[in-house]
Amino acid sequence: MKLLAPSILAADFLHLEKDVRLINDHADIIHLDVMDGTLVPNISFGFSVIDAVAKIAVKPMDAHLMIINPQKYFERCAKAGCSMLSFHLEAARKARRSPAKLLDQVRSLGMKAGLAINPDIPVEDVFPYLGHADYILVMSVFAGFGGQKFIEETYSRVKAVKAEIARRGLDCLVQIDGGADLSNAAALYGAGVDIIVAGSAVFKSPDPVKAVKAIKGA
Ligand code: DX5
Ligand code: ZN
């Protein structure tokens, strides 16, 4: 699958409606980066923004929870209309929660369940949970900020997850997030990435529609 999920973290918050409609019209998924300043060193936005986006969202909303105790907000995300939700393995560990149970909980609320890992977490650490996840989010930068440089090791990490998914005949997608743009999109899709998340490459571009089309066509 070759899907593009623009991240509104890089959008123009004074004209958010315009950027959400752009995703509705030209991209596949609306990626929502929720940061708490504790799991990651930055604060982004919460439900006031998500609820506003939901009012005009046509494409599925994908909540990427970069927060401790993510389970506290699963239900609220479902209520807001998110149809995909990922949380970090690191957060589950901190909360001493079983990642498998948390993924099951996300699914039981009717959302696709994603498990995210930062670049310093061995990729094999997600293997035990592949049967419980609808997608694995292999971070291609350290979660926390948009506009960072893509980490090249992401390719081998994606390939390792894809190989394990194929070996076990599972139905689980792979998403990457951070530093993706037109220069690496083709290679990422080629490596087996199903969903590219891109913030700056879309919304900081002089022509976001053109950028979306170019990345999707890569
Ligand atoms: C980083 C976020 C990303 C970020 C991607 O913590 O999860 O979704 O917005 O931004 P770019 O594409 O600018 O690297
Ligand atoms: Zn994200």
Image (spheres, helix red, strand yellow):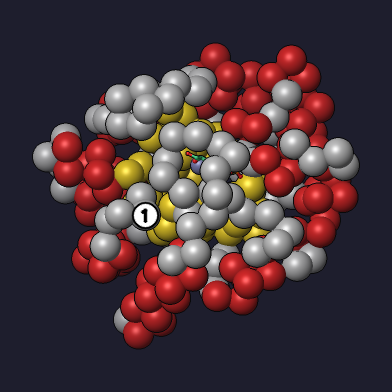
For the N terminus, the quadrant is bottom right
**In this rendering, does residue 173 appear at all?**
no
Q: Quadrant of the C terminus?
A: bottom right
Residue count near mark 1 (Cα–Cα under 10 Å), binned few <14, some 14–19, many ≥20: some
Foreground residue among 42 and 79: 42
x and y, in percent, of residue 110 in the image: 43, 44
Q: Which residue is mark 1?
A: 119
Residue 108 point in image, percent of width and height: 34, 45
**Residue toward you, 56 or 37:** 37
Q: Amino acid at mark 1?
A: Pro
Q: Quadrant of ligand 1?
A: top right
Please identify the residue farthest to the left as the structure is shown.
Answer: 96
Label 1 within 8 A of ligand 1 by Cβ:
no
Q: Position of residue 143 (x, y in %)?
A: 42, 41
Left or right of 170: which side holds 53? right
For the point 54% across and 54% down, which residue is it? 150
Residue 205 position (above or below residue 36): below
126 relative position to 98: left or right: right
